[in-house]
């Protein structure tokens, strides 16, 4: 019987535990989560979108796993009575200058096999009566769900299949023996045949601690980018029916501040993207000196900062001014003002950055020795989670077949 220890109780860790038990029903699977509850970080603080898969480079893991994952997560949610609302999504060009990028996105979507249509302003207003645009893409298959509820259902399922989930268990290191790895945590030592690192914002540090693998050096580092959200006041929520997104800046890794109707009917606006001063820092007041020092010591950060100085400073000024934030939203839906916005929960993205300042674009999952490390699983990893879990289980169980 193989003993698997999964580090991290976010959607990737839980989906991985499920896939391991599907592949090896007799396996001993333990999930160690440092918080007192599951899904407290990225998974519980995202936009709740089931992405269609139009944005990602054809042939990438993101493109294929997002497309397959949208179908599998929808089926899973529906089977567990978790709400899925097929809102569709409008991506709007607000000036002629954005049309080339809109058309490039259309082509990419079609290359990825996603049903997407280019429409004019009038048709766009049939979907979203208050939107303003010169042209738009309509993506019918985009939907919304509640990823925290998905995690609870995953947890129930894996417990029923024999897994143990231990919360308040912070993994602090590993001791390597010839035939096993002892996982050291605040819940005590735990021997494992295979360790799977799904630690999200801490994934690079957990990978570093697994020194038995290669030279122990992880080339990429996690750089935390906070995304702040506002909520539209209930009396203004009628301005948005579903999802309204800008055309993403091709130079920038994030999708741009958008308007998202959540499954509870509230409309969220965001996320922006500012450097977080703590990996789990959900506001400007939270500063973790070790996390800041890690960023400042990392060559890749300075390369990125040099190349993105202007947009980076714009993001910071928009973070500090609700008026500027509202102005970005008003480009999509004129009439939205700062008075319509109330602050909402922020999230921090775990984005891996290379030493040369380039972002690790695709999902990055590596088997090193006996263990598997998820080194980059940013958006659309929630959408793709069941496929990522399956892939990890294949990597992790490769020896036993
Ligand atoms: C603002 C924002 C918006 C997003 N929007 C979307 C979206 O609409 N659709 C989509 O598909 N994706 C979206 N994403 C991406 C998606 O949320 C993530 O890709 C996904 O949640 C990653 O899951 P995870 O399990 O890897 O990470 P996490 O949810 O962060 O889980 C990692 C877990 O590991 C635990 N951990 C860390 N260190 C240790 C340790 N030493 N010991 C024990 N446990 C540890 C943490 O406490 C945490 O619970 C968004 C992300 C953000 C931040």
Image (tube, rainbow, N blue to C red):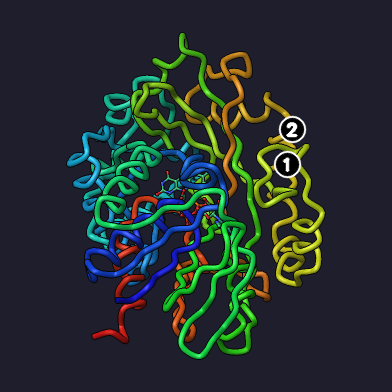
Using the image, tell me which numbered label, if any, was put on residue 320.
2
- Res. 12 image quadrant: bottom left
Position above or below: 167 against 230: below
Whether residue 96 is visible, yes or no, is no
Q: Assess whether mark 1 and mark 2 are in contact (beta carbons under 8 angstroms).
A: yes
Left or right: 35, with 400 as reference point: right
Q: Position of residue 219 (x, y in %)?
A: 63, 78
Viewer-nearest residue: 179 or 84: 179
Quadrant of the image for the C terminus? Answer: bottom left
Viewer-nearest residue: 191 or 17: 191
- The residue under label 1 is 316
Q: Position of residue 342 (x, y in %)?
A: 59, 19
**Of all residues shown, which one is farthest toward the front?**
188
Position above or below: 155 against 245: below
Indicate the secondary structure of the residue bearing disc 1: helix
Residue name at image x 74 percent, y 37 percent: 317
Q: Is mark 1 within 8 Å of ligand 1?
A: no
Left or right: 306, with 328 as reference point: right
Mark 2 crowdedness (10 Å alpha carbons): few <14, some 14-19, many ≥20: few
- Res. 130 image quadrant: top left
- Res. 319 image quadrant: top right
Residue name at image x 39 percent, y 61 percent: 56
Q: Position of residue 203 (x, y in %)?
A: 57, 64
Viewer-nearest residue: 49 or 321: 49
Residue name at image x 77 percent, y 66 percent: 302
Q: What is the CA distance from the residue labelled 2 to the residue labelled 1?
A: 6 Å
């Amino acid at each position: 019987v193989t003993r698997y220890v999964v580090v991290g109780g976010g959607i990737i860790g839980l989906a991985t535990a499920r896939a391991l038990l599907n592949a090896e029903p007799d396996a001993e699977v333990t999930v160690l989560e440092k918080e007192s509850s599951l899904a407290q970080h990225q998974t519980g603080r995202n936009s709740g979108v089931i992405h269609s898969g139009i944005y990602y480079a054809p042939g990438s893991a993101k493109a294929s796993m997002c497309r397959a994952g949208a179908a599998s997560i929808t089926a899973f949610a529906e089977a567990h009575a978790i709400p899925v609302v097929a809102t569709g999504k409008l991506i709007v060009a607000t000036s002629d200058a954005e049309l080339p990028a809109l058309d490039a996105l259309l082509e990419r979507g079609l290359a990825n096999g996603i049903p997407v249509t280019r429409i004019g302003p009038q048709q766009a207003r049939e979907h979203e009566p208050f939107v303003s645009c010169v042209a738009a893409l309509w993506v019918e298959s985009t939907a919304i769900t509640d990823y925290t509820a998905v995690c609870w259902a995953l947890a129930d399922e894996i417990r029923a299949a024999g897994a143990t989930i231990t919360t308040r268990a912070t993994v602090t290191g590993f001791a390597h023996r010839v035939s096993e790895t002892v996982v050291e945590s605040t819940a005590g030592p735990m021997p494992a045949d295979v360790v799977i690192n799904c630690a999200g914002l801490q994934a690079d540090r957990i990978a570093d601690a697994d020194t038995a693998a290669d030279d122990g050096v992880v080339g990429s580092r996690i750089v935390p980018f906070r995304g702040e959200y506002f909520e539209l006041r209930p009396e203004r929520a009628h301005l948005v029916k579903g999802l309204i997104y800008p055309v993403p800046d091709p130079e920038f890794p994030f999708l741009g501040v958008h308007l998202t109707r959540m499954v509870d009917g509230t409309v969220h606006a965001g996320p922006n993207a500012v450097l977080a001063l703590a990996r789990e820092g959900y506001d400007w007041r939270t500063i973790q000196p070790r996390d800041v020092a890690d960023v400042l010591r990392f060559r890749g950060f300075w390369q990125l900062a040099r190349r993105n100085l202007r947009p980076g400073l714009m993001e910071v000024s928009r973070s500090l001014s609700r008026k500027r934030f509202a102005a970005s939203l008003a480009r999509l839906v004129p009439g939205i003002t700062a008075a319509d916005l109330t602050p909402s929960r922020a999230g921090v993205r775990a984005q891996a950055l290379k030493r040369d300042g380039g972002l690790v674009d695709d999902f990055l999952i590596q088997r090193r020795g006996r263990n598997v490390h998820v080194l980059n699983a940013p958006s659309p990893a929630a959408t793709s989670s069941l496929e990522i879990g399956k892939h990890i289980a294949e990597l992790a169980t490769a020896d036993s077949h």
